[in-house]
Amino acid sequence: RESPNSATAIGSGKVQELALLVQDLGANLVVFDRELTPSQVRTLEQAVGVRVVDRSEVILDIFAQRARTRAGKLQVELAQLQYLLPRLAGRGPTMSRLGGGIGTRGPGETQLETERRAIQRRISKLRQEVEELRRHRQRLRQRREGSQIPVVALVGYTNAGKSTLLNALTHAQVYVADQLFATLDPTTRRLELPGQQAVLLTDTVGFLTELPEQLVEAFQATLEEVTEADALLHVVDLSHPNWEGHIEAVETLLDEMPLATGPRQLVFNKIDRLDPEWVEDVRLLYPKALFVSAANGQNLDQLRHTLAQFAAAFAPRPCGGRQFGDP
């Protein structure tokens, strides 16, 4: 289709094909790799007879499984409630039953209205707590700024190996797993470098193509660690089949963020999984990039040397968006 169908996203013919496929496979869930409106979800569920979820709901579910700290759980719950609020009307006939009695606004209030007000109150409370979290992190950043040590944020597509790289450089012992969004909360560690230089390395939440709007808003306190960093290390999983697409997706997201104008350094990770000759071909395409393996420590000395050069030249003022090593 040239554009999504307003009622079903995929059109009536494809909906019939989907319903037959669900029956043939005995499926109990249909997942769409795009965002659906609440009315599209309701129409599709009626047509296919099983639960339908969209891309945003899958991502939110993954985030909910990964959240370990109080800050992460707060932000995930806020994102989930913001996603749920406009979808309450499609949760079945019980949501439209009239309510009455003590504690309700009137005998004509529906269960839907009661639950909507409860969710709105919870969202308001969570936003206050997330704002306090943002202010707390702002105070921490101000302390770091007072130390005149540059802050370098590790950014990249989810599962690019940022946490593994932080552990390899600083022995931080951050949780590491071969899974999407293993890191939700930023972790900052000091890295001592040659020449009595030092930087503060900050691990951040992984990026994703078409990151749901609810997550961007809820994780604003986390993303500020990226926007206020003095420099960025853009970590790329070179072993992923779509590594070029990941670079483009992250760069697009970074260009949309109000970043400090510090330098960016491209770091290709996981080269231990690849043919060295192929890696050299990629190096010709990206001559200023670094090629490392956080898993086995390959070429990490080159990365430390590059960071030491930046730290030696660092001054607490905008850097004009240049690349590492540029004049």
Image (cartoon, helix red, strand yellow):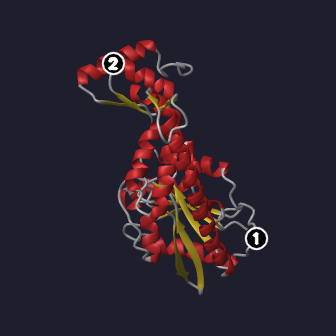
Residue 213: x %, y % from top left: 57, 43
Can residue 50 be seen here? The reply is: yes
Image: 210 above or below 233:
above
Image: 213 above or below 113:
below
Residue 83: x %, y % from top left: 51, 40
Residue 92: x %, y % from top left: 40, 27
Q: Which mark is residue 84?
A: none
Whether residue 73 sits left or right of residue 221 in the image: it is left
Residue at image x 44%, y 20%? 43
Residue 149: x %, y % from top left: 64, 78
Can residue 280 be seen here? The reply is: no
What's under tag 1, amino acid-wise? Arg
Residue at image x 32%, y 26%? 50
- Residue under numbered circle 2: 19
| Mark closer to the chain start, 1 or 2 | 2
Q: Which corner quadrant of the image does residue 321 belong to?
A: bottom right
- Residue under numbered circle 1: 317
Q: Which corner quadrant of the image does residue 93 belong to?
A: top left
* Disc 1/disc 2 C-alpha distance (Å): 59 Å
Q: Nearer the viewer, residue 320 or 62?
A: 62
What's under tag 2, amino acid-wise? Ala
